[in-house]
Amino acid sequence: MVRQSSALVIVACVLIAVCTGRRAAEQPLQRSAYVWQRQWTSTVCEAIAASSTELDGIVALGAEIEWNGWSTRVIESSINWAALHHFRKCGIALRVTPVTNPQQMQQFPLAVVAAEARKLLSKADEHGVSAELQLDFDSTVQNLGSYAQAVAALRGKLQPTRLVVTTLPAWLDSEGFTRLLNNCDSYVLQVHSVPLRTAPTAWKICDPALARQWVDRAAAYKKPFSVALPTYRCIAGYTPSGQLLGVTMDAVQGRWPPGTKLHEVATDPDEMADLVRDWRKHHPPELREIAWYRLPVATDARNWRFTTFLAVANGRRPHRQVDVISHGENLIDVAICNNGEADERLDVHVLVDSDQSAIAADALNGWWVEQHEKQAVFTTNPGETSQLRPGETRNIGWLRFGAPAKLQLHLLRQ
């Protein structure tokens, strides 16, 4: 009986372990998003409130520490703490700018980072917000061991607050990565970046195939983690000889020197939707959350619209529908309307067939028009990178006829 009882206990333990493992693998992925604005305007707060029923958590940029290797400057965000009450899970991000000289890592500003972290967490506590701290620093691979030591020291100063670190795919094969994971409570694997060292035509902010590989490699470390996926697009400026001048991401495009060649790269919502769909069906049990960089705000210049974000976050490709419409009797205005869920690049031909020839036609800024007897063709100017947001309508030109005309409108992609 003793042996039989022991056997039953062993079998029961095995079954519990198997069932527990299965539950972990089938655990739904949580969803969070970053708020990276320094100024929390009413529009930012509105976006946070609108997302509260769709997201499990939010991570707000609390401050950025500009560090050049010797001196530091702290730039804090004007967080509206009341807005964070919409979420049961909150994180405060502390960004430390990377240095270019590896030797400067020995002077990592731990005291400044710890003081600012305690200050931010104290503010959160004063406003009734329970938050973890997320440290964002792009260490070089060769300095990862030193960075792990700094993280361990910071964790000791902040306990019992949870300390989360953002990590890069380049770190996954480093010996220092294990030390880093041992010195934090959790981590975020960032699988998006602006690949400045590749030709602009080969840019991809997030490669789904690589993202899948990196997540599987991260899961092998057997520590729970989140994966950060992008929502943004950016524009790079090059000299005529091909030298990179700079990249515009979150801000409004700055002034470029004469002759600058611009190249835009955007996160593909269809690819991200497929990635989310696949992970929702099957993902490593260590992967617990998808963290979106960044929460769409209505005033964003280069980010998805909220309707795009909702579709992709649910693992569904955004519906696309671009219609050509006309209004007026004579003049007749021609316009394009985006009735879909994603931004549309206006790189198209609009064909206007009529039962008579137009006596006059003109195109608006960014377009040109050609007339061919009973047809007018409106075309976007070469090099135009204009985007049409979901729900937006844009006039592209007009036609005048000698008598009331019947029109047929068609849209062709270039």
Image: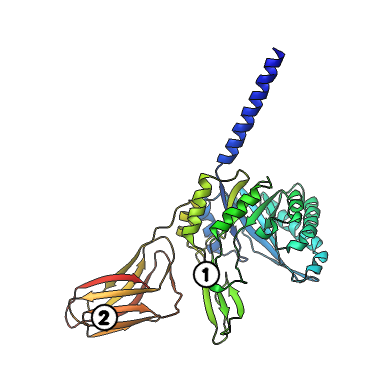
Q: What residue type is disc 2 on? A: Leu
Numbered marks: total: 2
Pick whichever, 112 or 70, lies toward us: 70
For the residues labelled 1 and 2, say whether their Cβ atoms are less than 8 Å apart. Answer: no
Residue that numbered label 2 is attached to:
399
The residue closer to the viewer here, 348 or 34, is 348
Number of residues whose C-alpha sits closer than 10 Å to that of mark 1, classed few (under 14), some (14–19) or many (20 or more): some
- Estimate the x, y position of residue 326 in percent, counting from the top left: 28, 72
User: What SS does tag 1 mark?
Assistant: strand
Secondary element type, mark 2: strand
Q: Quadrant of residue 321?
A: bottom left
Q: Which residue is mark 1?
A: 265
Q: Residue at x 73, y 62 (%)?
A: 141
- Quarter of the picture containing the N terminus is top right
Q: Position of residue 63 (x, y in %)?
A: 69, 63
Relative to 411, residue 402 above or below: below
Real-space Cα separation, disc 1 to disc 2, in angstroms: 35 Å
